[in-house]
Structure formats: C-alpha cells, structure tokens
Amino acid sequence: LRAFRKLLSLDAPPGESLEDWLRIALSLPVDPTVILVETLADRPERLCRATNIALSQGADPLSAEMAFLIALESDPSCASTYAWRLHKWNRHEEALIVLADAPETCPTLLVRGRVHRHLGKFDEALMTLERAMEKCTTHQDELQFLLGDVRLRTGDLRGVAMLDALLL
C-alpha cells in the first residue's frame, strides 16, 4: 500500500492515466477513497477528479463524499463534480447548496440547470441554462437539449425548434 500511495502522489507518465492506477486501487483490500484522501489531501483538484473516477469504478459513496468535502475545502471547482454526484444520489437540494457559493463556470451552470430542471424549478433552470449556453464552449448539444426541454415544459414552443435541430 505504501508504494501505491507514493504512485498516486505522482503525475502519471505519458501513456498511463490516473484511471488505470485507480483500477488497481479497487483491487486492494482498502477502500480506494481512503488511500486517495491520505495521499492527495494536499492536491485537492486531483483528489476531486480521482474520487469521481473511483466512484464510477465502484468505490464506496460514503467514503467518496468525505473525499469530496476535503477537496472542496481548498478547491471550489470541485463543487460541480460533488454536486453532480449528489444529484445522481437523489440529493438535489444538497447539490444546490453546494453550488450556491461555487464559481459560475460552465460545469457549475450545467449541473445547477439540470438540478433545477429535475426539481421542476423551470424558471430557475431556464435562466441557468441560458447563462450556460452563453458561457460554455463545450456541451452545446446537451445544453440545447436541456434548454429545449425546459422551454417546452414552460409552454415556450421555441423548444420544439431547439430539439428538432438536434435531430438534423
């Protein structure tokens, strides 16, 4: 385990990735998020990313939540990743609380818009997703779908054209 902790603290050499290393961590007799917290607490951006990867590979959600909170203390950009996981765990109001003080970045706006949409807060979703369309250079198809859907749900028929454009 000591060697693995050292490995995680380093940057991956060309041709290897953090994902590959985390796959190995999942085979160890310890929850990988425990190792991540012990090893990467001083690198919060990496801790956040590694925790998200570990979760997608089957890590314990409770341990992962602890890791997200530790990362979030020093890295506000982790808010969107943590909020996305809260949303996936059906903890939508908590996701909005995490996003409340987060910088208004593309990922933050995208998650906030999705959560508002899920909760049926369509006016908030509409405003958030419109800001995201202006700010984001990526995720345009996803944003167009979400915005078109929210517009239709609020009776705005411009949503039909937005959704039709995705099919062409």
Image (spheres, rainbow, N blue to C red):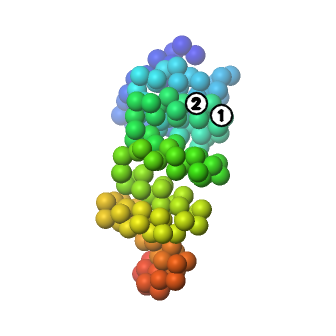
Residue positioned 40% across, 26% down in the render: 43
Q: CA distance from mark 1 to mark 2?
A: 7 Å
Label 1, secondary structure: give it: helix
Sort mark 2 into few (<14), some (14-19) or many (20+) by Cα contacts within 10 Å: some
Q: Provide residue 135's location: percent of width, then percent of height.
A: 31, 60
Number of marks drawn: 2
Residue 5 placement, left or right of 11:
right
Label 2, secondary structure: give it: helix
Residue positioned 52% across, 34% down in the render: 68
Q: Which residue is mark 2?
A: 66
Q: Which residue is mark 1?
A: 62
Q: Provide residue 164's location: percent of width, then percent of height.
A: 46, 83
Q: Are marks 1 and 2 in contact (CB under 8 Å)?
A: yes
Residue positioned 52% across, 46% down in the render: 97
Q: Is residue 16 visible?
A: no
Q: Provide residue 162's location: percent of width, then percent of height.
A: 43, 80
Sort mark 1 into few (<14), some (14-19) or many (20+) by Cα contacts within 10 Å: few
Work out whether 167 lies above or below 68: below
Q: Callout 2, which amino acid?
A: Met
Work out whether 46 lies above or below 141: above
Work out whether 139 lies above or below 64: below
Q: Is residue 37 visible?
A: yes
Question: Which disc number belongs to residue 35?
Answer: none
Residue 47 placement, left or right of 88:
left
Residue placed most toward the observer, 106 or 115: 115
Q: Callout 1, which amino acid?
A: Leu
